[in-house]
Amino acid sequence: MSVLTKRPVLRWLVPATAAAAVIGGGAAVATVAGAADPTLPERSAAQLLVDLQTARLDGLSGTVVQRADLGLPPIVSLAGMLGDDNLASLVDGQHTLRVWYAGPDKARVSLLGGNAQTDVIKNGTDAWIWSSRAKTATHAKIDVDGDHGAPPAGVPASPQEAADLALKAIEPSTQVSVGRTTKIAGRDAYELNLIPKDHASLVGQVSIAIDAAEHVPLRFRLYPSASDKPAFEVAFTMVSFDRPDDAQFVFNPPAGTKVTEAGDQLKGEEARKQVEAHKQELAKELAKQPAAARPQIIGEGWTTVVMAKVDTKQEGADAPQISALLGQLPKVSGAWGSGRLFTSRIATGLLTDDGRVFFGAVSPDKLYEVAATHR
């Protein structure tokens, strides 16, 4: 079972922009990392992996800082298209949040962005999403036994969430080793390193700092190949494993807030039936598509490439804007045809003029090679 599934709070850790707090938080990360390495009992990589899988978390509160330097092209600054939202800035810069957790049915995350604040709260059967900037709040009744109400996390936003994704990649293609001991947020931690064996991957190393006592990831770093500077880092700068007071999860909409009800509560069996019906409907729709139109997974491990086909005839109100954005990507061509290339420090994307899309944590040459053999 996934480590993340066992601790639902860590799916709620969504980074946010907070200029003042980030400056302080960034300094805290640097200061903590510079502390003397603690002396801890030796543990093997296998033992640390077991620690991650068997850890139990009853309570937590703290501050998490995310730093991203992905080397993305300018067109990914899509705040206008994505909406004026803290989440639109996750792909670059530094961000911070406050998080509280008191069990699977009590969790709260506060995202700070300048003078704005966004809160995501789960308290028993009540779930809230509140935006101070928009002066809106969405309320939903959820099934405490189900898995509803948690917001999606498009970008790994906590050490645990990022670690969980990385652990899924452990297979014969990965070298796993124990690094140095360290201190994160004032706590002793072991460092677990995952290194791709295939040097064609743009990922050089994944490093996870694991709390020596609680066995919870305190820091996650993703390094590009041929670089000792992380492309992505998310770490606690302050953390407590005491259970927060229940009052922390009670939300009363401030005066002037427009409240929207998301719908009635779905009971356990009713929710399961609805989810199953959606799955069957989706399966039927996918079955109608020709095999060539479905996404394909090419290769394995760290050098996996995903291929899909898209309709190159853009339609809809956003079509001109999308076309203009794609037009800013460099034009490339080869034996595989011609198209546009998206590059970053850890991933590459290729959109061909004939409607094929290739994406993976590999070099452009690798994508060109795949594109030449997969039409």
Image: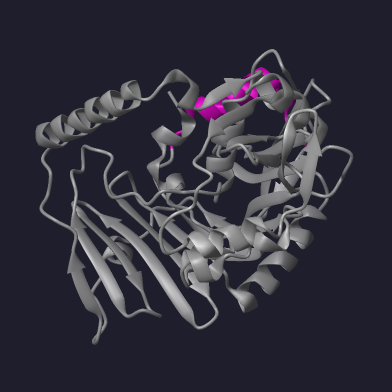
- Quadrant of the snapshot with the N terminus: top left
Query: Which quadrant of the view contains residue 167?
Result: top right
Q: Position of residue 251 (x, y in %)?
A: 26, 69
Residue at image location 38% in from the left, 79% down from the top: 132
Give percent across and percent down for residue 272: 17, 31
Q: Is residue 210 left or right of residue 260?
A: right
Left or right, 186 with reference to 286? right
Residue 218 is situated, as x and y percent measured from the top left of the image, at 61, 46
Q: Would residue 328 be found to the left or right of residue 293 on screen?
A: right
Question: Which residue is at 29% across, 24% downward?
Answer: 283
- The residue positioned farthest toward the top in the image shown: 172
Residue drawn 67% across the image and 38% down it: 208
Tell me the magenta residue range: 39-56
Of 108 and 232, nearer the camera is 232
Q: Quadrant of the C terminus?
A: top right
State how many labels appear.
0
For this rendering, which residue is in front, 166 or 258? Answer: 258
Relative to 83, does residue 306 appear above or below in the rendering?
above
Q: Residue furthest right?
A: 226
Vertical side of 94 occupied by 47: above or below: above
Q: Is residue 51 magenta?
A: yes
x 70%, y 73%: residue: 23
**Along the viewing direction, whichever of 252 and 262 lies nearer the viewer:** 262
Residue 49: quarter of image? top right
Decide whether residue 306 is among the magenta residues: no
Q: Is residue 22 visible?
A: yes
